[in-house]
Amino acid sequence: MSNLNWSVVVTTAPRKKPKLKTTVQSLKVAGWEDPIVFAEPDSPTCDATTHTSDFKLGVFYNWIRAAQHGLDSGADVVMTVQDDVWFQIASVQKTGLVDAQQ
């Protein structure tokens, strides 16, 4: 995805209707192949690298933990997303971050 080095982190918590797998899959389809999940205890699981807290941090502190990971990664760009968003390749192409031929 472009010449920039991205760190993409996803925060998640327990939900009655989990959407984490769909979010992670949409990130991968849109070109961010290695999102890292930061999860509260008892959160849904997926096939991405996941760091699960030993105890409940709450929304803000779980986000801080995820954002700090992104900042520490040395990436040019840090993107944090919640576990209930979806990305489409067409929306990413419009930003110029990926080649429209993909």
Image (cartoon, grey):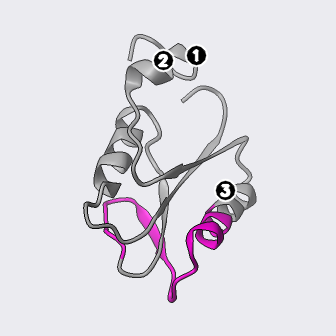
- The residue depicted at 34 percent of the width and 56 percent of the height is 20
Amino acid type, label 1: Gly
Q: Quadrant of residue 19?
A: bottom left
Residue at image mark 3: 70
Q: Nearer the viewer, residue 16 or 42?
A: 16
- Dot 3: what SS? helix
**Classed neighbour count for the residue bearing mark 1: other residues with Cα under 10 Å, few (<14), some (14–19), many (≥20):** few
Location of residue 29 with respect to 17 vertically, above or below: above
Residue 34: image x %, image y %? 46, 50
Q: Cα distance, mark 3 to mark 2?
A: 23 Å
> Looking at the figure, which quarter contains the C terminus?
top left
Residue 93 — which label? 2
Q: Cα distance, mark 2 to mark 1?
A: 5 Å
Q: Are marks 2 and 1 in contact (CB under 8 Å)?
A: yes
Q: Which residues are magenta?
A: 43-66
**In the displayed image of the protein, which residue is found farthest to the top?**
101
